[in-house]
Image: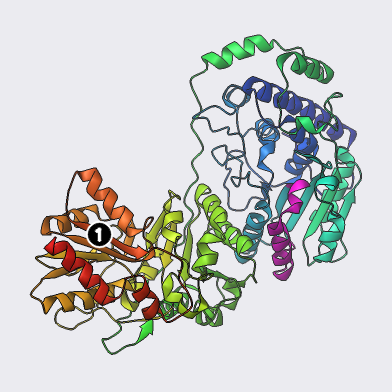
Amino acid sequence: MLRIDLSQEELSQEQLRELEAMWRRCARRIILATTLAGCGHPGGSLSSLHLLLMSYAIMRHDPQQPRHPARDRLLVSHGHISPAVYSVLVEYGYASEEAFLMEFRRAGSAFAGHVEQTVPGVEWNTGNLGQGLSAACGMALSLKLKGLKDRRVLCLMGDGEQQKGQVIEARRFAVKFDLDNLMVIVDRNHLQIGGDTDLIIPQSIRDEYRATFWNVIYLCDGHDFAAIYRALRRAWLKEVENPARPTAILARTVMGKGISFMENVARWHGEALKPDMAREALKELGYDEDIEALFERRKAYVNFVKPFDVEVDYPDIDPGQPVVYGPEVKLDNRSAYGKALRSLAEINNLPGERPKILGFSCDLEGSVKMTAFKEWSPEAFFESGIQEHHAAAAAGAASREGFAVFFSTFGVFAVCETYNQQRLNDLNHTHLKVVATHLGLDVGEDGPTHQCLDYLGLLQNLFGFSIFLPADPNQTDRIIRYVATHPGNFFVGMGRSKTPIILDEEGRPFFGEDYRFEPGRADWIRRGDDGTFICFGPLVSRALEAREILAKEGLSIGVLNMASFRPLDTRAILDAALVGPIVTAEDHVVDTGLGAAVARVLVDAGVVVPFRRCGVSTYGSSGKPDDLYRRQGLDPQSLAQKMKELIKG
């Protein structure tokens, strides 16, 4: 396994010969794996192969400890070059050649079509272009916070993905936060699926990096190992114009390099060679393979290797003492969130020590109440500007590095705008705490563009996200302390307005000193004999008002708070069905939120009960939340009337 000490100024002839031999072995694997699978990206893999091999040769990494905390990190943003990545990982002892060739792109295999962490040595699941540099920023930021300032993060990217706006967001962020430990290597082969990159979207990548204040090194031959080494060494040792800033190496490469009939042909970006062409390609590399025999072996191969487990790296967070807000308090949930976050920081982010809790926001720190956290831990707060796509991805990557990370912005930006970033965070087993404020019609006068009404419908598609929706400031405090102390991805959602303190029947805070939040457990705020309102967030207080209206007419109605939307308390829903009619009430699109979830529970259990779903059925307008709720039939009087109709019916 080749290791090169950066103290040497040039590669030796012996090292060059070894690298050439490694390249031939890896190129062979690329051709075989894609041909045997009948699909894949051989052209781009051959384009990037020299850059990958040279990077691994100078990095500090250990195949026996793929997740060693003091390793350098190589993130491959254009994940479709998985054949090249897996080939190089085989060369360095992370995986076996047999498993790669026999399993590549097969159902149940660790060797997926785009790189995934199920193969040891892969740092980040990629494939959706333009997000890798953001994740690399999160890693580079984390290494500096952990004091590993001499460790590097390399991000290998394609030239086509430089067209993505998120890439520019990440470039700016990297400069703002002095990520001098970050290096980008762009595979500049001038081809993408549709043909010439300059015809599809003209751009000067070198000028763009310079315009965002990066150091730039141009490499005229990205297949010359000696030249690649010199460029990497310059960047690694910070022999650049501004050593305090990140560096980009733009390497001129050739699609399909090394196979004469594949070179500079866009077709081979994403098309595998047929067996007869594969034989010709392998002959050019000096190999004579019995491809038919390999096909037969692959067909009979059933003993897939076990996918590599991504371990949990999560800090020990002290939850501190919960706050109890009394009946007289008038407070919005977002302020309770801000106070809880500051409290957690005071206990866990001690002066002079590495912080345990990080905060990311996007030009909205005051609105999402992160200012107090920032004042206590300025070194742990990252104002990312109006760059939500990048911030969501960078925060997710940082949460995999041993930090509790809170990402806060308005709901339309935290979920709707960044859905794909959150989806990739989920696939990457992050531990991100997405705390979204300004949800639903409760946003009020800002109007329909800012009234996030579909977040539950979207988030339910992300298998790894828990979803919590507190009813008042006290429950908000408990939920924030819970998510801070537990690994995993969490979404905590809340509105904008002040929320009444929910009281028990004796007039004391329902979520008082003895209350402990438990995922999957609903809260019976009131029990009733004639029916039940099931609701969450700002609709809980309104359901309680509707209950009082009905009580004057002699009806006893329960109120069930579903603050834990995922996991969902199905037992509580079925218990409510035993009582009688159910009305769900939510500040969310009526067809994709709580009402739909309750309906599924009832249908799956074969339970028939009078049932009505109340929610948002059309976009709102600008106005006071109470007026907007009234227009959608979500005010206490309308809810009471709907329950009464069900009971009488």
Q: Is residue 178 magenta-colored?
A: yes
Relative depth, front residue between 592 and 152: 592
Is 389 left, or right, of 619 in this rendering? Answer: right
Q: Is residue 73 above or below residue 532?
A: above
Q: Is residue 370 above or below residue 414?
A: below
Relative depth, front residue between 81 and 579: 579
Residue type at mark 1? Arg
Q: Give coordinates of residue 409: x percent, y percent.
A: 53, 70
Q: Is residue 192 magenta-colored?
A: no
Res. 49 in view: yes
Q: Give coordinates of residue 446: x percent, y percent.
A: 52, 77
For the N terminus, which image quadrant? Answer: top right
The residue at the point 75 percent across, 13 percent down is 276
The residue at the point 71 percent across, 58 percent down is 165
Write the start and end of the magenta stretch as one range.
157-180
> Circle 1 sits on which residue?
612
The residue at the point 39 percent across, 70 percent down is 480
